[in-house]
Amino acid sequence: MSTQLETSPVSSDTGKVTFLDAMVIGSGVAGLYQLHRLREMGLKVRAYDTASGVGGTWYWNRYPGARFDSQAEIYQYWFSEELYKSWQPTERFPAQPETEEWLNYVADRLDLRKDIQLSTRIVSAHYCEEKGRWNVTTEAGETINTQYLIACCGMLSAPLTDRFPGQSSFRGEIHHTGLWPKEGVNLKGKRVAVIGTGATGIQVIQTIAPQVGSMKVFVRTPQYIIPMRNPKYSKEDWEKWGSRFHELKKRVRETFAGFDYDFDAGPWAEKTPEERRAVLEKLWEDGSLALWLASFPEMFVDEQVSEAVSAFVREKMRERLQSKPELCDLLIPSSADYGFGTHRVPLENKYLEVYLQDNVEAVDCKKAPIEKIVPEGIQTADGKVHEVDIIIMAVGFDAGSGALSRIDIRGRNHRSLKEQWQQEIRTAMGLQIHGYPNLFTTGAPLAPSAALCNMTTCLQQQVDWITGCIDFSRQHGKHTVEATKDFEDSWVQHHDEVAAKTLVVKTDSWYMGSNVDGKPRRLISYIGGAGNYHRRCDEIAAEGYPGFAMA
């Protein structure tokens, strides 16, 4: 149970001051669990969120077709077997409304709402060295004074909205998928443009195709895809998964990407071409991300293996476009583009078949890039104006670093996190940043949770580590925790050395920050494996948190 919050009124210009032991930014998967853990410690804690409801990414991303691509049985909280068994998913990959409902269920079950303040945008957080505390301000003028500041802002929560000149001139509607209206958008019979064909764009395109009058898809980067297999789950199915709770809980913490599957096929070099093909076929038929994250890890480091796996996927995709072979060059990556798995791999449901419809046109943005938005629609570099009623922007996010960079965060000596990250993005294991005492982060750069992990696995692990670190420092009479410069330097060096061995760093993608103009190039996610990362975190905790100075 949390204690009553202490507030002190000040002038009407600045609103009130709320004094806390700990403050959590965000009420998604990580924020809800972090609030729960800190309350268990008896701390005076409150979570704040810009949204009007809990759920984090599952509150904001309510675009048509939104669903996660981690199986329901492992996209879970692991601290309570009872909680796991009491919720009944309807299918293997539930859609956004069900996931949002599940997170609301968790908030109610744990009685978290009384310590969550919604519809509150955090605009600044300044560290006071003299007091060893953070002064946080909201857009409404409220001040929160807190000892610990835990950022659970999300790794994909800073949408890139102003992408093209002239957007404000458009006479129709423009909607970013990450800011989709709660009331929905009427697409029936409309002329719709979709910009972007990443994981989100694919979900939108395949979902709205039967509704719209016509659709133009602006394609710049073709995607390797995997067909999703999404069976319904019965009560009996879920009871079977529930009986494996402890097995799954242990398993996901040990694997490369926090899923229940891993690279168990054996070395590529030791298999015959027929054996390799059999592995790929089996995982393709599974209809999950297993082909990417549980086939052959050599695809990430060996160009020949990468090309072999990529060719397999290209072959599967071409089979579906036989009636319009001219679409293959536009929708299927070539060997000259990038290798399978070095980009985010989307799951899909008859996505390619959409382009076989008479009312759907794929616009080649490599030949004629989008030049600007005009009142009638979208103008491309060849001078053509594509007239539409609605523009859907599936153009992504400032991933990993964007959510924190959009808050004016200032640490010791008034240093600015935004300015630092404009020069170089660096953290200490994605858990802290040197120069910002008592600021802890989840889903931040240089941790697996920034991109390369089943999010519930890695976010919970980070929350547990942060909670343990705060508890350790308090038990030892310490008031501040800060990653040392030496420790941060060593982690950044290790992170870069591991990344440099892979083909991922040779591919332009949001993994490398390539989608944001001027963003420093660095793989935002640790690629040494979630299991290895978790073991290293456990070792640091067991050794008394070396590398994290406490005072």
Image (cartoon, helix red, strand yellow):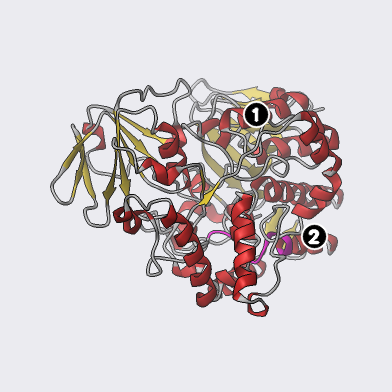
Label 1 CA crowd tier, 10 Å (few <14, some 14–19, many 20+): some
Residue 110 percent across, percent down from the top left: 77, 28
Residue 18 has which mark? 1
Question: What residue do we see at 57% from left, 59% from top?
Answer: 525
The quarter of the image holding the N terminus is: top right
The quarter of the image holding the C terminus is: bottom right
Number of callouts in the render?
2
Above or below 484: residue 396: above
Above or below 374: residue 273: below
Is residue 526 in the magenta section?
A: yes
Residue 294 percent across, percent down from the top left: 66, 61
Which residue is disc 2 drawn over?
538
Q: How many angstroms separate mark 1 from mark 2 (CA)?
A: 34 Å
Is residue 11 in the magenta section?
A: no
The residue under label 2 is which amino acid type? Asp
The residue under label 1 is which amino acid type? Thr
Location of residue 328 (image quadrant): bottom left
- Residues tagged 1 and 2 counted as in contact (Cβ below 8 A): no
Q: Is residue 130 left or right of residue 253?
A: left
Secondary structure mainly formed by the magenta segment:
loop
Location of residue 115 (image quadrant): top right
Question: What residue do we see at 72% from left, 44% from top?
Answer: 74
Q: Is residue 39 visible from the viewing direction of this image?
A: no
Q: Secondary structure at mark 1?
A: strand
Residue 165 percent across, percent down from the top left: 23, 43
Q: Is residue 409 left or right of residue 536?
A: left
Label 2 CA crowd tier, 10 Å (few <14, some 14–19, many 20+): some
Q: Nearer the viewer, residue 522 or 289?
A: 289
Above or below 343: residue 45: above
Q: Nearer the viewer, residue 528 or 75?
A: 75
Question: What residue do we see at 64% from left, 36% from top?
Answer: 145
Q: Which residues are magenta?
A: 524-532
